[in-house]
Amino acid sequence: MPNLRTLKLDGNDITELEPGAASNLPSLLELYLSNNKIAKLQPGTVSGVSNLQYLYLDGNDITELEPGAVSNLPGLLTLVIYDNPMCFGASVVAAVDQV
């Protein structure tokens, strides 16, 4: 699916994403992963999706956003991570700072 622009996986009880899970979707602009059960976003999970502009992770169980989890996304305009049980400490700032 190299031409896929939008992928909506909201509310599917997804618990984890493998690093590089979206790497075969180079044209992806919007990725909706809201209202799942994702607890951790590992480094490289969305790497290789350089055109990604919108990443929705709200309403999950994310407690930590590891450094490198959302890196190498030069086109990212919006990262939605509210409604997760995470503390916005140094690790979140470091992870987002790499965008």
Image (tube, rainbow, N blue to C red):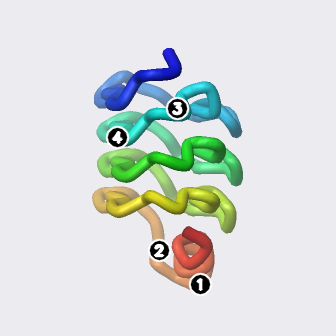
Of residue 51 and residue 99, the one placed in the foreground of this image is 51
- Give the structural element (helix, strand or loop) at label 3: loop
Q: CA distance from mark 1 to mark 2?
A: 9 Å
Picture residue at 61% right of the left edge, 73% below the top = 98
Residue assigned mark 2: 87
Q: CA distance from mark 1 to mark 4?
A: 27 Å
In the rendering, which numbered label is found on residue 90? 1
First in sequence: mark 4 vs mark 2: 4
Residue assigned mark 4: 30
Above or below: residue 98 compared with residue 32:
below
Picture coordinates of residue 72, whole percent (x, y): 63, 59
User: Which image quarter holds the C terminus?
Assistant: bottom right
Q: Report the amino acid beneath label 2.
A: Cys
- In front of the other: label 4 or label 2? 4
Of residue 73 and residue 14, the one placed in the foreground of this image is 73
Q: Quadrant of residue 7?
A: top left
Horizontal placement of 16 versus 80: left or right?
A: right
Above or below: residue 65 compared with residue 37:
below
Is label 2 in contact with label 3 (beta carbons under 8 Å)?
Answer: no
Q: Report the amino acid beneath label 3.
A: Thr
Q: Residue furthest top?
A: 1
- Give the structural element (helix, strand or loop) at label 1: helix
Would you call the spot at circle 3 few (<14 residues within 10 Å), some (14-19), or many (20 or more)?
Answer: few
Picture coordinates of residue 45, whole percent (x, y): 63, 43
Residue assigned mark 3: 15
Q: CA distance from mark 2 to mark 3?
A: 19 Å
In the rendering, which numbered label is found on residue 2? none
Of residue 3 and residue 91, the one placed in the foreground of this image is 3
Is label 1 in contact with label 2 (beta carbons under 8 Å)?
Answer: no
Picture coordinates of residue 79, whole percent (x, y): 37, 60
- Give the structural element (helix, strand or loop) at label 2: loop
